[in-house]
Image: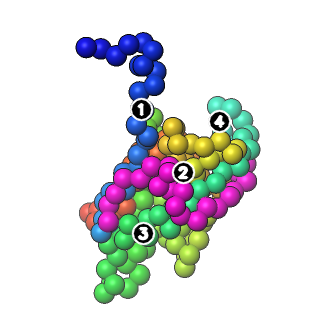
């Protein structure tokens, strides 16, 4: 028997999840609520969007480095500077992709304060999913909304 119209609108809507996958000892799925367990950072961001001009927003969320470090990337301690070969691919629910290097977010190298934002302008993103926010970027092309997958990869074939 189908739901009545009165109860159809009250059915639980699943929260979007971010899949952390790839070369990780602890791959997992995270919701915005899970991301709230990490220390929250705030970033006032201004970037140029080709379709809507200059955008100014305030974001809060944990650092991407903190979240990915907790998933234990497969760095080989026997290989000097092994973490420098790792790439991070981020995909949004709309198919938008961005690629970062581990060195960009690593405190020993670029130390970029890249966020997995859980709010935008004090509005929670629990229904939309977290956003990738790169405060240092002048262009907003690497800001990914509704992240559904983050893949850490250190095992890609050598380029020749």
The mark found on residue 132 in the picture is 2
Question: In this image, 54 relative to 26: left or right?
Answer: right
- Disc 4 on helix, strand or loop? loop
Q: Can you identify the residue that label 1 sits on?
A: 12
Report the residue at 42% width, 32% height from top. 13
Question: Looking at the picture, does residue 6 appear above or below residue 103?
Answer: above
Question: In this image, 112 relative to 159: left or right?
Answer: right
Q: Can you identify the residue that label 3 sits on?
A: 70
Cα gap from disc 1 to disc 3, whole angstroms? 29 Å
Labels 3 and 2: the sequence-earlier one: 3
* Circle 2/circle 4 CB separation < 8 Å: no
Question: Looking at the picture, does residue 155 appear above or below residue 79?
Answer: above
- Disc 1 on helix, strand or loop? loop
Q: Residues within 10 Å of mark 3 (few under 14, many from 20)?
A: few
Can you tell which of label 1 and label 3 is closer to the viewer? 1
Question: Looking at the picture, does residue 134 appear above or below residue 68?
Answer: above
Can you tell which of label 3 and label 2 is closer to the viewer? 3
Cα gap from disc 3 to disc 2, whole angstroms? 17 Å
Report the residue at 54% width, 47% height from top. 131
Q: What segment is highlighted magenta in the picture?
A: 26-47
Cα gap from disc 3 to disc 4, whole angstroms? 35 Å
Q: Residues within 10 Å of mark 1 (few under 14, many from 20)?
A: few
Horizontal and vertical percent for residue 95?
42, 37
Question: Looking at the picture, does residue 80 appear above or below residue 153?
Answer: below
Labels 2 and 4: the sequence-earlier one: 4
- Residue 33 in the magenta stretch? The answer is yes
Dividing the picture into quadrants, the one containing residue 40 is bottom right
Q: As rendered, which of 121 and 37 lies closer to the eye?
A: 37
Labels 1 and 2: the sequence-earlier one: 1
């Amino acid at each position: 028997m189908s739901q009545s119209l009165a109860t159809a609108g009250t059915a639980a809507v699943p929260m979007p999840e971010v899949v952390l996958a790839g070369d990780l000892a602890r791959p997992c799925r995270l919701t915005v609520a899970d991301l709230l367990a990490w220390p929250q950072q705030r970033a006032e961001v201004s970037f140029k969007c080709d379709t809507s001009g200059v955008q100014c927003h305030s974001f809060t969320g944990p650092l991407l480095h903190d979240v990915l470090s907790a998933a234990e990337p497969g760095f080989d301690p026997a290989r000097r500077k092994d973490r420098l070969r790792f790439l991070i691919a981020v995909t949004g629910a709309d198919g938008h992709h961005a690629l970062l290097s581990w060195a960009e977010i690593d405190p020993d190298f670029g130390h970029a304060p890249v966020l997995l934002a859980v709010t935008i302008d004090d509005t929670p993103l629990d229904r939309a999913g977290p956003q990738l926010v790169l405060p240092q970027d002048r262009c907003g092309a690497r800001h990914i909304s509704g992240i559904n997958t983050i893949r850490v990869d250190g095992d890609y074939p050598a380029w020749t």
